[in-house]
Image: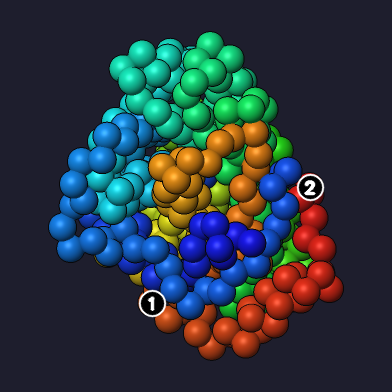
Amino acid sequence: MLSKRFGRIAVGTVAGAMLMAAAACGGGGNTSASSSAAPSAGAASEPAKASGLKVGLAFDVGGRGDKSFNDAAYAGLEQAQKELGAEIKELSPAGDGSNRGELLRQLAEAGYNPIIGVGFAYGEDIKKAAQEYPDIEFAVVDSASNAPNVTGLLFAEEQGSYLAGVAAALKSKAGHVGFVGGVENDLIKKFEAGFSAGVKATKPDTKVDVKYLTPDGDFSGFKAPDKGKIAAEKMYQDGADIVYQAAGDSGTGVFQAAAAAKKQAIGVDSDQRLTVKEADLQAVIMTSMIKRVDVGVFQFIKAFQGGAKGGKNDVYDLKVDGVGLSTTGGEIDDIKEQIDAAKKKIVDGEITVPSKP
């Protein structure tokens, strides 16, 4: 059971608080755990003593400071530093991500073990590095395990996005919402598929606009706030009153468009009402679909320290609160009952959320 191996996982405002402290877009099977207590990035009052554990982490495009996906991963890395006494090293790729493999090798040659690649785009590079360094354990976020010394950290983004769709449909006064994806690939399509399914299951007549910033393979869509703003502006002008973004750093542009139009938006990965610093942008973030990358990263490191090996996938879904919605600001408190009911149906298997549009 994941509850025995990884500890207990919680989501919501607790998750947001963790990410705010840190920041101040399988084969393992799904298991269940209680959501009453969450590991906290600030749980240790003092940093743990050095343990000899050296952890390397290579960020996805956008790097640390994206207030979203990469920052969530860093929160888990920082927690390992504080609670496990780990020495940590973080590296960011070039803008086009062309040197991902080089970053992994740089960390390996410097003696870091384990090493984590943040993002599905590391899949092939992790596979090659794992072959070159068989004595080092690797993990890759959003990509399945592909070697005996690789652990895949996978998330049910479509399930959390379904709940975001339920919330959007219930809160939309216009009956018109939108989705902005950073890159049109299979991973981000999971967000779109879940969101649209949640909207349509709740209010079938609600219109859903969809826009991707760049095609598959062009990862600049995760770091183009100007494109995110233009895409969201068009949706608001066309009548949408809530836009959900899964676009990494480009999501900032969606929030800017929402603030200018006096409309609402839904964040992603982290509790962005907390991680976004600008007050006017915070105010438009109705909720965020939280993806507990911080938990996945920390629990992988903790398991490694305990002697665990790779060749498997650790799956974080609604059953273990690996995804969910933030409640910071109280914007969705009035629809909690409906959201909880939808979550229960997914967990119980009454609803199967599509992972493709």
Q: Assign the N terminus to one quadrant of the image.
A: bottom right
Q: Residue at x 31, y 36 (%)?
A: 53
* Among numbered discs 1 and 2, the one appearing first in the sequence: 1
Does residue 71 appear left or right of residue 35 in this picture?
left
Does 256 sit above or below residue 148?
A: below
The x and y percentages for residue 77 are 35, 44
Q: Considering depth in this image, is 129 or 157 the residue closer to the camera?
A: 129
Q: Residue at x 65, y 67 (%)?
A: 32
The x and y percentages for residue 303 are 48, 46
- On residue 329, which mark appears? 1
Image quadrant assignment for residue 122: top right
Does residue 113 appear left or right of residue 296 in this picture?
left
Q: Residue at x 52, y 34 (%)?
A: 139
Dot 2: element: loop
The x and y percentages for residue 217 are 62, 24
**Residue located farthest toward the left when viewing the structure as drawn:** 46
Q: Residue at x 44, y 20 (%)?
A: 104
Dot 1: element: loop
Whether residue 34 is visible: yes
Whether residue 169 is visible: no
Q: Considering depth in this image, is 138 or 239 the residue closer to the camera?
A: 138
- Residue matched to label 2: 356
The x and y percentages for residue 337 are 62, 87
Residues at badges 1 and 2 in contact (C-beta under 8 Å)?
A: no
Image quadrant assignment for residue 18: bottom left
- On residue 85, which mark appears? none
- The residue type indicated by label 2 comes to Lys
- The residue type indicated by label 1 comes to Gly
Q: Considering depth in this image, is 351 or 226 the residue closer to the camera?
A: 351
